[in-house]
Image (cartoon, rainbow, N blue to C red):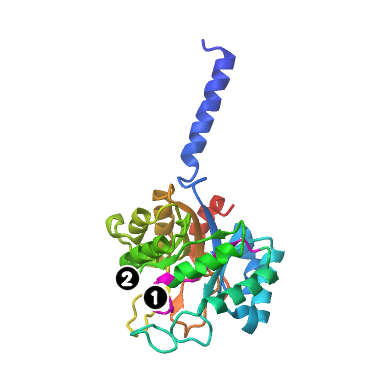
Amino acid sequence: MIPRRIRLLLLAALACASAALLAPATSGAYVVGVADQSPTLFANPYFQQLAPKRTRYITPYDSIFKQRATVDAWMSAAHAAGLEVVVAFNLPASMRCPNIGRAKGCKPVSTASYRQAFLAFRKRYPWVRIYQPWNEDNSLTQPTAAYPATVVSYYKIVKANCPGCTVLGADIQDLPNMASYELQVLRAFRAAHVATPKVWGLHNYTDTNRFLPDKTSSMRRAARVFPGKIWLTETAGLYRFQPQNARQSFRPDLARQKRAMQAIFSQANHYRSKIDRVYLYQWFAPLASNRWDSAILDAHGLPRPVFNVLVQNRSLFR
């Protein structure tokens, strides 16, 4: 007969093994944040149900001068809710891209203007400790697309004027120019004799919404090219998307959106040694006229089926 103490030890071991089997495979691997441009995000009851501790905000690089009230409203709400914020700077509201043929009006802002705006932003929100010097560097909707060296210039300004801050080296969208742009950015860092950044940003919408196999995924490419860690700084399951050429690429589909969100967590789990963070975008449904809709809530403010995927992975919103 097995002694009582041995039986208790065996039962404890079995309980631990069962807990390990029941826990999500991604448990402890990375953390998940939620982003939306509306300051009402943090008071939303469904957002509070998940209780994320991290969020991300995209704002024109010069918004501190031209849209201060808007930025103040969002930043104040995030700060009051106790969330850690990643700030990603974007092109000014007055600039029009794409940068086709280096079109007039779609060129990178000067380093002097960028430095002036960043110093003012940093002074007003000193509690922000994570920055992306520019959003979606390789997108044709950004002035940095044809000027990868400017990515390094802006990085240097943020790094020099934000001691102890986490500064991402580049923010790459999974577009056809991704492979060449990544190499150009890395070469620009080396040419500038700047230490290679430890963290990079990636938007993997194509991977997960078109359900690409791993061998052709942007994540696999980024993991091979970029040293250090990768943050999925913007990702989501698309409910609806109409590209600028007016061809309906993604018709409204709740089931596909849910499946795409599941694919995000699957990919992050697969690359958990490389991925530290995942930021989901967006929370509230936009106007019906908007080309893009990756919202977790519908137009009535109620959760779509995709919300259940987030609930199932609630432990990652720690």
Q: Residue at x 60, y 72 (%)?
A: 118
Disc 1 secondary structure class? loop
Residues packed near mark 2 inside 10 Å, few (<14), some (14 to 19) or many (20 plus): some
Question: Which amino acid type is shown beneath numbered disc 2?
Answer: Asn
Residue at left offset 69%, top offset 63%: 81
Looking at the rendered structure, the kind of residue marked 1 is: Ala
Q: Which residue is mark 1?
A: 145
Q: Nearer the viewer, residue 38 or 295?
A: 38
Q: Position of residue 119 (x, y in %)?
A: 63, 72
Question: Marks 1 and 2: which is nearer the front?
Answer: 1
- Residue tagged 2: 177
Direction top: furthest residue: 1
**Gap between marks 1 and 2 measured at Cα:** 9 Å
Q: Is residue 35 visible?
A: no
Label pair 1/2, CB-CB below 8 angstroms = yes
Say which of 18 and 89 sits in front: 89
Residue at the extreme bottom of the image, as rendered:
104
Crowd band around label 1 with a 10 angstrom C-alpha radius: few (<14), some (14–19), many (20+)? many
Majority secondary structure in the magenta region: loop
Q: Does residue 160 appear in this view?
A: yes
Magenta stretch?
A: 128-149
In magenta segment, residue 148:
yes
Residue 57 locus on image (x, y percent): 57, 70
Q: Please tell me in which quadrant of the rendered image residue 79 appears.
A: bottom right
